[in-house]
Amino acid sequence: MTPSTSAGVPPVLALLPDAAVAKYLGRGIQSGRERPPQVALAKAGVAYDERTAARRRTAPVRELLDEAMRRFADDRYAADGWLAPRLHATLRMSRAEAADSRVWNHLAMVVAPDYVVWRHKGADTAEGPGIATAARFCGPHYTQTFSRLWWAAELFRDGDDYGPVATACRIQDVLNTTMRLDVIDHRPTAQAMIRVIGGLLDAGVPRPGDHVNAFSSAVNAAGSTLMYDVLAPDATPDADELHDWIQAGVEEAVDWDHPEGPHDGRVARAAVDALLPLFEKLRAEAPLRRRRPAKGEEPSVPAPRSSGVTLVKPSDLV
């Protein structure tokens, strides 16, 4: 860590309510010209219990973010694919824990507001400096700077294999659109979609984001009448392995070159293969909807007609 980024960072993450972010977040912070009021935010935060705090040290996360900014200084968008699996392997938690927006608020406002601005700040204009939108500090799981990366890794990993996550993050529309779908919670569906999306990238199709948006909408619409879990049954992930992996994070340092997720079971290849013919057909027939993002802005699309992925399953609450 450098002095400028480590100064004032608490040793352990906390839980920062949405109301505190709304109260103190302003354009000065969003543009990077001002630092969030650390004393006031510290008072507003809720501390973890001693047992959980051991898994919430900020130093490994801060070091990881500093490395991402160094490695991808010339291409901040490319940082997502590198950072997502490593953030997931560093901040080890259950889905129930990760569904609590307060931990991501604290990370964005107290531990690494500079990363939020670096990654998401818009272009400066004659009217003033560019800003990172408020939702990047405190927003839905598919929009908030750090939550979106953690959930991308969680939803698209294949057991301990983070390879599919890198593919997912190569197209921003996967994070912007695909991650909002109800059906993406079904692991064979997620893996089959990544296989199809990977094929688009390998084929070098122009404007792949348009294809991803159309394909995602088609898969979600078909999922309202087809039971993907019947077509492609999925085994229940091994909860004990996940628990052991989470607890091991207290002592283990993440290998940045070869990060590994929990060994809680990979998706059966037969289940993925069962969906591929249907998904290839949906991709080929899905009508494209053209869009023209402003220069210098990330692609942005309307939310699909979905209530969003179910972040917490009943088994996650055990």
Image: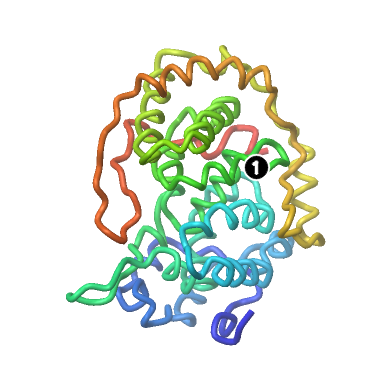
Please, is residue 155 above or below residue 278 in the view? below
How many residues crowd mark 1 within 10 Å: few (<14), some (14–19), many (20+)? some
Residue bearing mark 1:
163
Residue 224, position as x, y percentages in the image: 40, 18
Q: Residue at x 71, y 31 (%)?
A: 266
- The quadrant where residue 68 appears: bottom right
Q: Residue at x 52, y 15 (%)?
A: 277
Q: Residue at x 30, y 43 (%)?
A: 301
Instruction: Identify the element where label 1 is drawn.
Output: helix
Front-lying residue, 229 or 208: 208
Coloring basis for residues: rainbow
Residue 117, position as x, y percentages in the image: 42, 70
- The quadrant where residue 180 appears: top left
Q: Quadrant of the C terminus?
A: top right
Q: Residue at x 70, y 23 (%)?
A: 268
Q: Residue furthest front?
A: 204
Residue 11, position as x, y percentages in the image: 66, 75
Q: Quadrant of the N terminus?
A: bottom right
Residue 225, position as x, y percentages in the image: 40, 13
Number of numbered tags placed on the structure image? 1
> Mark 1: which amino acid?
Gly
Please, is residue 91 above or below residue 276 in the view? below
Q: In the image, is 297 to the left or to the right of 69? A: left
Q: Residue furthest left?
A: 127
Front-lying residue, 168 or 239: 168
Q: In the image, is 18 to the left or to the right of 104? A: left
